[in-house]
Amino acid sequence: MTPIPIIVDCDPGIDDTIALLTAFVSPELDILGITPVCGNQPLERTVRNALQVCELGRRTEIPVYAGCFRPMFREPIYGQFHGQTGLGNTVLPDPVKAVEKKSAVDFLIDTLVAAAALRKRITICCLGPMTNVAVALRMSPQIAEGIERIVMMGGAYREPGNRTMTAEFNVLADPHAAHVVFSSGIPIVALALDATHQVMLKPEHVAQFSSVSGRISETLAELMAFWDRNDVRRYGSRGGPLHDPLVIAYLLAPHLFKTERARVFVEHESELCMGQTVADWYGKSGQEPNADIVTRVDAEGVIAFFLERLSRYAEKAVA
């Protein structure tokens, strides 16, 4: 099978790191580049984290392009659950790999225009605020022709927000960018809190992952342990929601997910509900659906999927 060409747009991030490490050992994916953006941490740190994760996963051949250093119009906000560096208490060696000279926006434009010219299309995996993609679309709308679809983690529909009463972090961090992307006409698969809160990474799972992940076991265990929210009232159990990795799981195991079509609107004017994603499930707006929203996840199947993938770090081929 021909690998799926993807670009990973992210803001590493503990859960971004798990997503990247999974993608690195998945030959079904052809990772053309990683484009960090200001999100969980300032851009300088998300770029550094991406470079460090590439070295941890021994995938230093994958280019990393620095993206936008702030949202399109608003002041930056940063993540609350990733520690001071974005990687919890985990300390990784200084990166040897260097960031590319080309910007992430230029890389997106050049790569997607070239793909369209060859009648090819690339999947964009958005694991953070969508500033890079939105700016590229505003600069060169024709890049949409080179995008197969956007599979993104962000938003909250029937589930309350996790950063405000109504907004999920990735969308709140740059609601104008989210509005641009959802208005672009590009096919979108949306993994919102409605989906990610169905898959909790519990302490017993951390022990399982640590036991199978070979040379990255200590690092992975530290990251996952830090991710424990210990908020039983909110989540119904110990652990933390497996947000960004579900994007990679969806690409590789779509049978574990159920989606519903809907029109998505992004609030980018009201301060009370800034960043809220509103789904028109029943056609009240009169507008055509613009997203496939994941509504159900086979949580046990997803945990088993990640256990199998991350166990590949124990195999001789990647040892």
Image: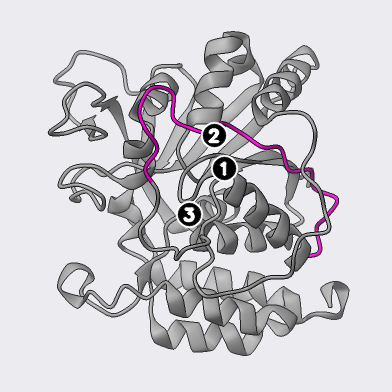
What residue type is disc 1 on?
Leu
Residue 90 image position (x, y, % from top left): 57, 74
* Quadrant in the rendering for residue 118: top right
Residue holding disc 3: 244
Q: Are marks 1 and 2 in contact (CB under 8 Å)?
A: yes
Write down the region rendered in magenta. Answer: 57-77
Q: Alpha-carbon distance for marks 1 and 2?
A: 5 Å
Query: What label does residue 43 carry, if any?
Result: 1
Above or below residue 148? Residue 17 is: below
Q: Quadrant of the C terminus?
A: bottom right
Circle nearer the N terminus (3, 1): 1
Assign a secondary structure to mark 1: helix
* Relative side of 139 to 188, left or right: right
What residue type is disc 3 on?
Asp
* Relative side of 296 to 136, left or right: left
Circle nearer the N terminus (2, 3): 2
Assign a secondary structure to mark 2: loop
Residue holding disc 2: 69
